[in-house]
Amino acid sequence: MNAQSDDNIERLLKLAGPRPEPSAAVRDEVYAAVRQAWESGHRRSRNRRTLAFAVAATVVVAVFIAWWLPARSPAPVFDGPLAQLDRGELEISADAGWRPVATGDTLDGGAVLRTVADPAGLAMLNGVSLRLGRSSQIELLTPRRVRLHGGRLYADTAGKRFHAGSAIEIETPDGLVRDVGTRFEVRVEPGRTAVRVRDGVVMLATGSGEAAAGRGQALLFDNGQLERDVVSPTSPDWSWTLVVAPHFDTDGRRVSELVDWVARETGRELRYADALVRNSAVSTRIHGSVNAASPEETLELALQTTRFSFDLQEMALTIDKRREE
Amino acid sequence: MPVIHPDKLLTRRMQRGDQSAFDEFFKAYFSRLYRFARCRLDDEDAVKDIVQKTLVRAVAKVHTYRGEAALFTWLCRLCRNEISDHYRRAGRRAGHELPLDDLEVRGVLESLDDGGSEDPVRSAERLQLVLLIQGVVDHLPARQGNALEWKYVQGLSVEEIAARLEVSHAAAQSLLARARQSFRDGFAALGQAETDLFLKR
């Protein structure tokens, strides 16, 4: 073994640094999709084998029990802390009626919460961001499940930690809404449940069956009938979610994290001019905090101190290197 | 008694519906495959889509994996096909696999000694070299790649690496020696003659 050669290997590896990891949001989204494909493929293959033994009916029942009943059955309430109030005003049901929740207060399983005149932002302890519209009411059930009694709820699973299955499930009077790594809104009104998907994929299971919706799609379950619609991910209808969005401190963060956050909060697709720009954004950190009124303004102010430029289009945010004048 | 390769064993467990095998598979290959695709595409969303398509295809065809090549190599082959389809649909030609040519490799390697150049062209070449080095490490067996990164990037001692891998000090040393040789071979094969000369000089 040549010592000089080993030294060169060390220099090369130090130059390269640690191998970058994809974001948790991307990892979770891909995991959910691939796992679903694997499970359904395995289920099909298992069913084929079982059919060969002429017990198809048993399989149908088993699949029904394994998939449908757990989705419809009420989840046992988790005994312990599940979330914290991050922003906005929220009330919790207590013996004597309703009392206000202070920012940072921990909320346990079984807590019934409501907003009155303003929306509120909740940080689930597993990293999911929940934003409750005004005049809405939810019940915290388990680390992955909440019940929406009325009003509207926006969920952003992008910052959650990696684990199997859905990050969040939302029970409504009409069924169960399950994410596959995404951002979406559920709205409950008497006799109807509406789901609007800003990114990723959402499954809605009702007594009539199950339906999926992807980015820019909406599902409306109204008096037992399922209807589909479209919704722009950048529509002003989403703007209420920004009021109680988690604070993003730019200081010390990578440029890639900033632009990912801006794209996520504004519903735009993130694009880089090329692979070099993307890699440079991953390795460049921002120094200093920016206090701005909107993600777009934060982006503009923060990138002024860097070598990056941006182009904000209706549906996309494109990041490039600043061209010298 | 025939010895079954660990990759083949993993895919067999996945075929049987073993959920821990699926998690093991995803944990072992997702990030590596993502980096593989990322070096070859200039659109972050396309990278995610292609990696997802590749893995979905892989789990659907896992019964066709015969263990003749490493599982990661098999996945890279599927991923290349997806990338080609992507460029075909977009009406574009695929970029170079790893766009450093010999002269560039030599230039960048020389620049390692100049204290860090501000030249944007050289910076870009450095970045390409970084991608190449990371690509080589990703293609090593996972334990070898991790051991190299722990030793030379994180600065762990052989004792610490042995503890992480739950092997003896001698076994960790032996693994590192094999990892260095594998890295040297892989890097020289990618960078061809110039790189080879550099590593031997």
Image: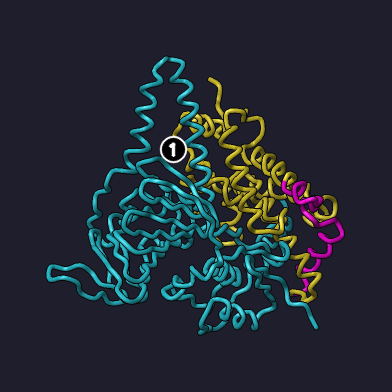
Chain colours: A cyan, B yellow
Image quarter (top left, top right, bottom left or bottom right) of the C terminus of chain A: bottom right
**Residue B82 % position (x, y):** 69, 44
Compared to A205, does A5 lie above or below?
below
The residue tagged with tag 1: helix, strand or loop?
A: helix
Question: From where the camera sits, is residue B158 visible?
Answer: no
Region in magenta: B86-115
Which residue: 66% across, 37% down?
A: B74
Can residue B93 be found in the magenta stretch? yes
Can residue A222 be found in the magenta stretch? no
Residue type at mark 1 is Gln
Compared to A324, does B50 lie above or below?
above
Compared to A62, does A37 lie above or below?
below
Q: Residue furthest left?
A: A96
**Residue A99 % position (x, y):** 20, 74
Tell me if A143 is positioned left or right of A314 in this view.
left
Which residue: 63% across, 63% down?
A: A17
Viewer-proximal residue among A110 and B11: A110
Question: From where the camera sits, is residue B154 visible?
Answer: yes
Tell me if B99 is positioned left or right of A70 in this view.
right
**Residue A226 % position (x, y):** 43, 47
Compared to A103, does A171 lie above or below?
above
State the residue position of label 1: B19
**Residue B4 % position (x, y):** 55, 27
Viewer-proximal residue among A271 and B5: A271
Q: Residue furthest top?
A: A53
The subunit letter for the residue under badge 1 reads B
Q: Quadrant of residue B5?
A: top right
